[in-house]
Amino acid sequence: MSEKHTWIIGIHAVTEALKQRPDAVVELVVQAGRSDQRLQAVRELAQAAGVPVAELSKQELDKQVHGVHQGIAALSARAGAVGDEKQLGTLLDGLDHDPLLLILDSITDPHNLGACLRTADAAGVDAVIIPKDKSAPVNETVRKVACGAAETVTIIAVTNLARCMQSLQERGIWIVGTADETAKSLYELELTGPLALVMGAEGTGLRRLTREHCDFLAALPMAGAVSSLNVSVATGICLFEAVRQRAGSR
C-alpha cells in the first residue's frame, strides 16, 4: 500500500465510504467464503460504483489490515488525510459562515477519537483539531469507529495546540473549554458566533496550557452519582447545544 492510500475497515465504515466518496475507493476486498447478506450488500454497492472487488482469505486479510475488519476492507485514496495549520487557515478563510470547530486535547483512545469524529460530522463541525503528539493516530480503528466521518470531516493535527488556539482567537474565534470543577454550566454560555469547543481526556481533563488559552470554561451539570461522562458522549452534548443555539440565532 502506498502512502497515498489508506485502509477503511468494517461494514459501516466501508459502506459510508462507498456512498459518500466512491470515486476515492480504489478496491474493495472481501473475505473469501463469506456470503452473508450485509457483506453482499456492500459488494453490490461497490460493483454499482465500478469499484473492483477482490477476495482474500481471512489470514491474508488479517495481514493486510489492522483491527476488526468484519470480513471487509476498502483501499481508499487519502481523502480523509490529516491536514496542518496552513490548511486550517485556508479552510477558515474560505468559510461563508461562522466557524464551528472541535479541539480534542489528549484523546489517546482510538475508539473515543473515532466516536468524536462521528459526532463532529453529525453536528456539521468545520474542522476537528488534534495535537500531533498527544492524540491517537487516525488509523484503521479510528476510521472504523467513525463510520465514514474520518473521510468527510476535516482533521487538522497541530504541533503546538496552545499556539493554534491563540491564532484562532486572533481571528475572533471564541474558545470554550470543558472542565468539571468550574461553576459555570454549559447551558449558561452563548455558543453562537465563531466558536471552538475544547474537550479533554477522561480523568485528566484539559492540560494546563490548553485550559489557560480558553476564553471560557464550562461544566456539564451532573445530577447522578457518576462524576463524569465518556468524552465522546460529552462531546455530543456540547456540540449539539451549540447547534441548537446557532439554529435559534439565524
Image (spheres, rainbow, N blue to C red):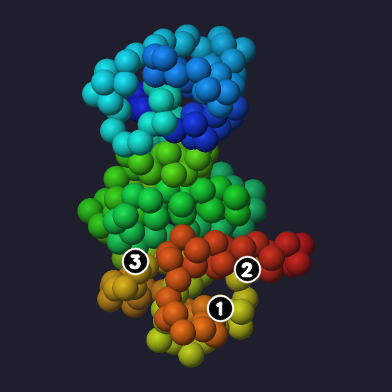
- Disc 2 element: helix
Give the answer, above or below, for where 119 lies relative to 250: above
**Mark earlier in primary sequence (1, 3):** 1
Q: Are marks 1 and 2 in contact (CB under 8 Å)?
A: yes
**Mark earlier in primary sequence (2, 3):** 3
The picture quadrant where one finds residue 64 is top left
- Disc 3 element: loop
| Residue 85 visible in rendering | no
Which x, y percent locates residue 29?
41, 17
Left or right side of 58 for 185: right
Q: Name the residue under label 1.
A: 186
Which x, y percent locates residue 57?
32, 15
Amino acid bearing label 1: Leu
Q: Name the residue under label 3.
A: 201
In the depicted view, which residue is nearer to us: 111 or 182?
Answer: 111
The picture quadrant where one finds residue 5 is top left
